[in-house]
Image: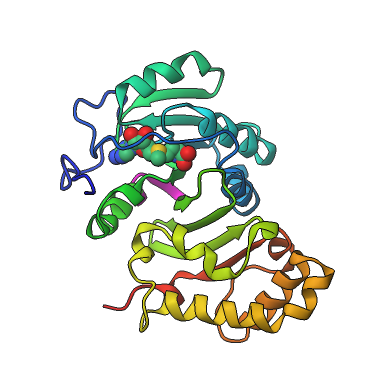
Amino acid sequence: MAPRTTRPQSSARGHHQSASPVGTPTRGTTNPNRLRRMDRWIAATHGPALRRSPEPPLAVDLGYGAAPWTAVELLARLRTAEPRTRLYGIEIEPARVEAAKPYEHEGLSFVHGGFEVPVPGRVTLIRAANVLRQYDEEQVAAVWQRLCGRLAPGGLLVEGTCDEIGRRHVWVALDGSGPRTVTFATRLGSLERPSDLAERLPKALIHRNVPGEPVHAFLRDFDRAWAAAAPYASLGARQRWIRSVRDLAADWPLTDGPRRWRQGEVTVRWEALAPRG
Ligand SMILES: C[S@@+](CC[C@H](N)C(=O)[O-])C[C@H]1O[C@@H](n2cnc3c(N)ncnc32)[C@H](O)[C@@H]1O
């Protein structure tokens, strides 16, 4: 059963020590390079916001897990976009913070905490990967709101899910005014059909992949476009994906273009996939 947050109603506090972090420890499964697709997308799409920050921009890897790899890697990839970037890894399980401490270096720190995000000031980026999947669907909106409340102006929250080795990803990107986009990202060689990604939908959408819900219609249309693009398979899975996404763009509000599609990605406006009711 999904864990309950310990203090779901209390407000965000911007300080270093968190006596009672908001949330509940869950399984710490992680893997090196697991979140590379998400990291690269963030660096590409959010790089300009990082560079605009008057102060060195602050990023958070929330719930980095049993080992600090994803935090170390996220900072390295963000620094390719903006070298001044600093990053806090935040974990609700104290032993995981202790295990990460030896990996601290200039601009990288690990702290004990939860959804209150106990770091000084407001942050330009919060990434929470494979964290909310272990909570209940009805907790998601409040957690999103709390996390978005910790963002600096122009800041971004990226919350999503992937498989163990990062071949299939789906994430939601939110700013201070709420959810903006949903991104599907995959290693194209591993894909039989786009709806393979359904099993990695973030918590807000995974229970909505049923007839009558927009995300179900989207994946159905994507599979149809993929089937129609079968002749392109002889040119490779990448060409087939790009052709399918072009077809999809006739009916769905996509926010990206061929440069991202080539990476095995597609991004859709949140409003088009938001759950009904
Ligand atoms: C499955 S691991 C994901 C690790 C890494 N983000 C990844 O994707 O590979 C989820 C981690 O989130 C942590 N976690 C759960 N709720 C949290 C919260 N409210 N605040 C901080 N960490 C949390 C758990 O303790 C666990 O270590």
Q: Nearer the viewer, residue 212 or 71?
A: 212
Residue 267: x and y, percent? 57, 66
Q: Residue at x 45, y 52 (%)?
A: 161
Q: Residue at x 74, y 72 (%)?
A: 240
Q: How is the image coloured?
A: rainbow
Magenta stretch in the rendered image: 148-153
Residue 155: in magenta span: no
Q: Is residue 149 visible?
A: no
Q: Residue furthest right?
A: 235
Q: Is residue 161 visible?
A: yes
Residue 28: x and y, percent? 38, 34
Q: Residue at x 61, y 52 (%)?
A: 41
Q: Is residue 158 above or below residue 120?
A: below
Residue 257: x and y, percent? 69, 69
Ligand 1, seen in the image, is in the quarter at top left
| Count of numbered labels shown in the rendering | 0
The quarter of the picture where the C terminus appears is bottom left
Q: Nearer the viewer, residue 69 or 233?
A: 233
Q: Is residue 44 above or below residue 97?
A: below
Instruction: Name the quadrant containing residue 252.
Output: bottom right
Residue 172: x and y, percent? 45, 59
Q: Residue furthest top?
A: 102
Horizontally, residue 98 falls left or right of residue 125, namely left
Horizontally, residue 66 falls left or right of residue 193, namely left
Q: Nearer the viewer, residue 159 or 208?
A: 208
Q: Residue at x 51, y 44 (%)?
A: 164
